[in-house]
Amino acid sequence: MVLDNKTENILENPDLGSIERELSGCATQLALLGEVDLARELASALLIAGPVGGRRILNKQLNFAWAETGRWPEGILEEEKSEQSLSELSQIYEGNWGVGVQDESLRTFDEKGLQACLKEGDQFADATTGSSAMAKSQRLVKALDISLRLHPIKDLQKTESDDRKTKKLKGSAATDAGEELGQLRVSNLDKQSANIVNQIVARWGANQQIVYLAEAHPLWPLYLRGVLADAMDVRPGELKNKGKKLVEAFSERLKNPAGSSKVSSMTMKELLDLADNNTVNGAGKDHWSDAGDEPPKTLLKDPASEKEISGLEKKLETTLPNDYKEFLSISNGLGGGIGDGIYNGYFPDPALHATTDTKWVEEEYFQLPVELIDIPKEISDLVPAEKRTTDNGALDWDTPFPLFDRVLEIGVRDIDNLWLVHPNLVNEAREVYLKMHQAGSKEQKKVLERAIEAFAGSMDAFKKLEWCCVKWSSGGAATMESYSSFRKYLKSVTLDSQETK
């Protein structure tokens, strides 16, 4: 679905980083479908607010759209508007054939290259995920570019020139630009190009399809005149209304904390019951059949006794956080299948350990820097890095942060691990962030404060944090998600469990 984002989810999502990524994706789709003015409004809202993920969070290929129209978002850096910057982005596309066409002799913008791009992939090419689908996404965009070079549109007014200031579109393809240059329809294209466009829009949500479309700088004049929107049979008024609602929702969320969601005031028992039902009977139900398993009746276990909980604290020689102990008193562990925990919208999160399995992490491989908050590198660099070495000296890190050398493993599923981070480590990491805040410029302080508030709720709450929760996924696409408490993790994954993404 095109722009199927729910405004209530945007307003209620506490993860500011994911909100910014979602905004960038929506801005890219709007621009590709010709609604460049609304895309620009989204980009301006993000840049003015100060993105906690850094400026890299906004798709740089949107600069092609801004350059074509001659109107740039507020807050964009002057250097990004330069011909040199745009030329560098263009060169990336020209030389990037990547996984699409592996034979270098066929990477040519001629009939030979076109046929190579149109060649069918393997049996997985028409899937929405995976490397084969990604390769087809790239091949189709290259094919469209080559086809249009071989069969140029006679009445297409080029917007690229040495003097970009004299030839600019004004507004979006479906409205102002459409009135000035005329709506470009699929029927205006040659048969082969039209067929390629239809293939592209039919797999709009396939792996990297939108990304590769945005990278293709020669195709932006077509996008801005609405050819993709026409292929989708999207009515301009409908698309514009969707876009306006998204602009309003994102703008409000960037200015204000997340609103109350369905799970905000739930008790621990209510959270667990909802997550369990969503995973076994709701959105996560298909996971079990896809895995060839029968869904369990419940993920929940019998409660742990006070003796079992106190015995765990004695074994670990620590005092566990109250929210985690409350969870154990309701369900001594959680999960079904082989390590399957709460459904997160894509697949199950790690199953949660019983008191008998919760343990301190001893693997040196997991001793990574304690970076609890996602912030731009320019802010991380405000505090000098130190050489940090793991306990056995096997790994070195140049980082201002301590290493994860005192964390509890409370859950695991394949490469996904769920940890509780000891208050001493949280305190050390907090001191580093506060030093960054002290050393930062006014703008950097603003970005860091927004990131801290998104993570902990407020600066005061951040200064009082004790145990935090981290989900670490190792492997080739290693990722880390941090939560200010175990309860906040449960809230987040329970919200995610309500629908398949």
Image (tube, rainbow, N blue to C red):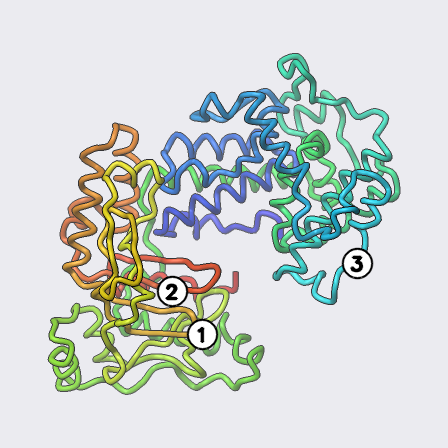
How far, Cα to Cα, is label 3 from label 2?
A: 39 Å
Mark 3, other Cα within 10 Å: few <14 / some 14–19 / many ≥20: few
Residue depicted at 42% across the width and 47% down the height? 19
- Disc 1 from disc 3: Cα separation: 37 Å
> Which residue reaches farthest front?
393
Give the label on residue 461, or none: none
User: Image point 27% across, 82% down: which residue?
Assistant: 357
| Percent position of residue 40, x then y | 53, 30
Q: Label 3: which residue?
A: 120
Q: Earlier in the sequence, mark 3 or mark 2?
A: 3
- Answer few, some or many: residues within 10 Å of disc 2's Cα (few below 14, many 20 plus, some between 14 and 19): some
Question: What residue did someone put label 2 on?
Answer: 493
Judging by the rendered image, the residue that carries numbered circle 1 is 279
Visible residue check, residue 182:
yes
| Residue shown at the point (36%, 51%) measured from the top left | 15
Secondary element type, mark 2: helix
